Amino acid sequence: MIALMRIDNRLIHGQVALLWTKHLQANRIIVANDTIVKNEVQVAALKMACPAIAKCSVLSVEDSIKVLNDPRAERLRIFIVVNNPTDARRIVEAVPSVPLVNISNYGHLGDDLKERIKITDASDHPKPHPAGVPPGCQRLAGGRGLLHRHLHL
């Protein structure tokens, strides 16, 4: 069972390892990212940062989708961590059982405030649609549309 997906450009760090994993009672953390999975040093560092109560898997987004859609995943409490909304959206669109997306530390910072990318803009929220997605936390940056399940800021 998927407990939560989190967008956090720091991936596994103290708050994720100590607070979120315990709060969610997760026994599996899946870090989904196509670039990081190719870097042995980053994979090793993420696995070292994983708390003892959970097993850590660092997978490509496609492999993560396969694992999450496997019926055997229902026996686990899975906490998915991605570092960008594009990967989150790919997973949400391919995995119907993602219950919630938590947006945390994410944003590309440039030298100019105009270059910063926002996840949401309070003035641009539509009314809730029939799937019950709450207002105030629906749009992805750049007007890329809605994630089809809940986003929790």
Image (cartoon, rainbow, N blue to C red):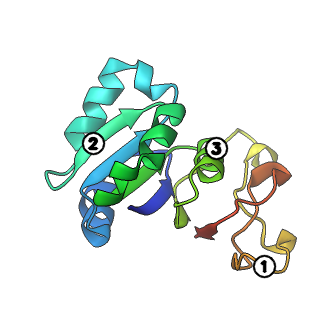
Q: Quadrant of residue 133?
A: bottom right
**Residue in view at x 16 percent, y 56 percent:** 53
- Residue 12 seen in the figure: no
Q: In terms of secondary structure, where does tag 2 sit?
A: strand
The image shows residue 41, relative to residue 89, as above or below, that is above
> 150 or 85, which lies in front?
150
Which quadrant of the rendered structure holds the N terminus? bottom left
Q: Which residue is mark 3?
A: 90
Q: CA distance from mark 1 to mark 2?
A: 35 Å
The image shows residue 65, relative to residue 147, as above or below, that is above
Earlier residue among tags 2 and 3: 2
The image shows residue 134, relative to residue 115, as above or below, that is below
Earlier residue among tags 1 and 2: 2
**Residue in view at x 50 percent, y 45 percent:** 82
Q: Nearer the viewer, mark 1 or mark 3?
A: 1
Q: What residue occupies the far left of the structure in this picture?
A: 52
Q: CA distance from mark 2 to mark 3?
A: 20 Å
> Mark 2: which amino acid?
Cys
The image shows residue 149, relative to residue 49, as above or below, that is below
Q: Which residue is mark 2?
A: 56
> Mark 1: which amino acid?
Pro
Q: What x and y, as percent, mark residue 54? A: 21, 52
Which quadrant of the rendered structure holds the C terminus? bottom right
For label 2, the crowd category at 10 Å Cα-Cα, with few meaning under 14, some 14 to 19 and many 20 or more, is many
Disc on res. 130: 1
Q: What x and y, as percent, mark residue 23? A: 29, 71
> Mark 3: which amino acid?
Arg
Q: CA distance from mark 1 to mark 3?
A: 21 Å
